[in-house]
Image: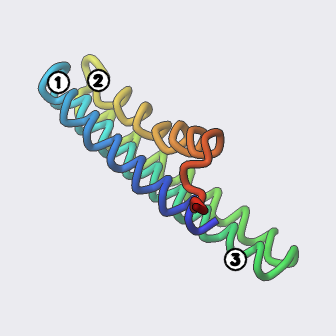
Amino acid sequence: MKQFRLMAVRLAILITALTAAVLSKTVGREVAIGLLGGGIAGALAFWVTALKCERVASEGPNAVRSTALRWNVFSLGLYLVVLTWAFTLDRDTLHGFFGAAAGLFVIRGVSLLLGLTGWDQKREN
């Protein structure tokens, strides 16, 4: 689980940064800033959730109730803050908002990719 968490967050941040750099040159600065903010927030929420899942797996089912509710509220609050901030970047065309919304999904795509391909697994020769 630790290897998956580390690989997913590193790859998500890398993809987010590279995409934001390309978008800042092609589409616009607001989209790139929104994507970067959303990508970082999504990776942070994934990091915290994965850490708590590791803790629940090691401690047993008694820790599930409080941990799940608390960190879901944390993630949703973080998403709300980032989307609100991105909305203020460009109120007319909402480019920053849509960039942040897309950035929140980068970690989801990366975790799906790693889950399907197994790139995070250690290779044996």
Question: Which residue is the site of mark 2?
Answer: 95
C-alpha separation, residue under disc 3 versus residue under disc 2: 38 Å
The type of residue carrying mark 1 is Gly
At label 3, counting other C-alpha atoms closer than 10 Å, the crowd grade (few under 14, some 14-19, many 20 or more) is: some
21 horizontally vs 72: left or right:
left
**In the image, is residue 85 above or below residue 92?**
below
The CA span between labels 2 and 1 is: 8 Å
Residue bearing the label numbered 3: 55
* Front disc: 3 or 2: 3
* Residue beneath the point at 47% across and 45% down: 80
Image location (x, y in percent) of residue 100: 37, 36
Report the residue that reaches farthest toward the front: 125
Quarter of the image containing the C terminus?
Answer: bottom right
Lower sequence index among marks 3 and 2: 3
Q: Nearer the viewer, mark 1 or mark 3?
A: 3
* Whole-percent x, y for residue 42 in the image: 47, 49
Q: Quadrant of residue 17?
A: top left
Q: Relative to the observer, which residue lies in front, 67 or 108?
A: 108
Q: Nearer the viewer, residue 47 or 31?
A: 47
> In terms of depth relative to the viewer, which is nearer, 14 or 78?
14
- Disc number at residue 28? 1
79 relative position to 59: left or right: left
| Secondary structure of the residue carrying numbered label 2 | helix
Q: Label 3's element?
A: helix
For label 2, count other residues whose C-alpha is less than 10 Å away and answer few (under 14), some (14-19) or many (20+): many
Q: Earlier in the sequence, mark 2 or mark 1?
A: 1
Q: Are marks 2 and 1 in contact (CB under 8 Å)?
A: yes
- Report helix, strand or loop for mark 1: loop
